[in-house]
Amino acid sequence: MDSNIAVLIDGDNIPSAFIKEMIEEIAKYGNPTIKRIYGDWTKPQLSKWKNILLENAITPIQQYAYTTGKNATDSAMIIDAMDILYSEKVSGFCIASSDSDFTRLATRLREAGMKVYGIGEKKTPNPFIVACDKFIYIEILKNQVEENESELIESKLIGKNVDKVTPAVIKLISSTISDVEDDDGWAFLGDVGSLIQKKQPNFDARNYGFLKLTPLIKSIKNFAIEERESPKGRLKLVYVKILPKYKKRFK
């Protein structure tokens, strides 16, 4: 059964263009039963949200800016988040913002046993990113929108905001494989992916132009991939290992 998720969106800080894709992304992790967006709806710059909110059943929450230079929207989101937490109606939260002011909120929600997913732009400060269980960049969703209009080839995305696979990324994958590998050096890819996510919440194969972790790892010469028959069904289990010459270098 899907877990229920509360989706809280900072209307002052999140672009409206990809809200549909954001909701679809969130649905991968649970059922978004509460969907609210916060902002001062008397401001003309938020008027473009109107039709989008109706199409996606998102409830707008009015929050006036009481003084210049103070973000009342953040306070309203935090208060609502704590009310929802104590209502015990959800088991997770999605905080859509690129603002580091929500770092303490994400930390507090996780302390209470909640799963916390963040969505924001690549400019999001690292403290907020690492305070979440998983952080998804809006730029990824933009790439998917662009690529869905054409044919996807070999599970790969070719977007304008794709990051390069750096030595640091290869080291992260290698160290994680070493953490969970068996005596023969093979590691179940599902375990590798889960541990990488814990180490680095903003890690996502789509950041590097790949739809899944498997094709990303296949593109790196340091690793070998092996597919094995599952004893319980038709799905194949994917295992990965560090090739010996690169393992020596890694160590």
Image (cartoon, helix red, strand yellow):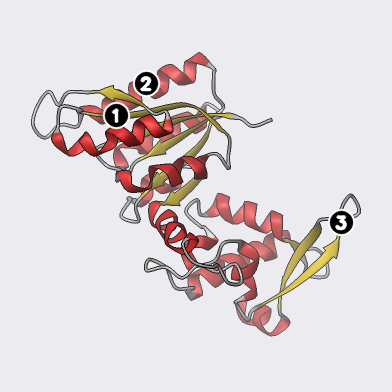
In what quadrant of the picture does the C terminus appear? bottom right
- Mark 2, secondary structure of its residue: helix
Ranked by sequence position, the earlier of labels 2 and 1 is 1
Q: Measuring 44% from the left and 54% from the top, which residue is drawn there?
A: 141
Q: Are the residues tagged 2 and 3 within 8 Å (C-beta)?
A: no
Q: Nearer the viewer, mark 2 or mark 3?
A: 3
Q: What amino acid type should be assigned to the residue bearing mark 3?
A: Ser
Left or right placement of residue 104 versus residue 64 in this view: right
Place of residue 113 in the rendered image (x, y in percent of width and height, measured from the top left): 56, 29
Q: Which mark is residue 206?
A: none
* Tag 1 residue: 38
Q: Are the residues tagged 2 and 1 within 8 Å (C-beta)?
A: yes
Q: CA distance from mark 2 to mark 1?
A: 10 Å
- Mark 1, secondary structure of its residue: strand
* Tag 2 residue: 80
Ranked by sequence position, the earlier of labels 3 and 1 is 1
Q: Measuring 58% from the left and 42% from the top, which residue is drawn there?
A: 28
For disc 1, the neighbor class at 10 Å (few under 14, some 14 to 19, many from 20) is many
Say if residue 131 shows up in the picture. no
Q: Residue furthest right?
A: 231
Left or right placement of residue 124 versus residue 92 in this view: left
Where 98 falls versus 250 (above or below)?
A: above
Q: Nearer the viewer, residue 79 or 154?
A: 154
Q: What amino acid type should be assigned to the residue bearing mark 1?
A: Tyr
Q: Which mark is residue 230?
A: 3
Place of residue 162 in the rendered image (x, y in percent of width and height, measured from the top left): 42, 68
Where 212 falls versus 106 (above or below)?
A: below
Q: What amino acid type should be assigned to the residue bearing mark 2?
A: Asp
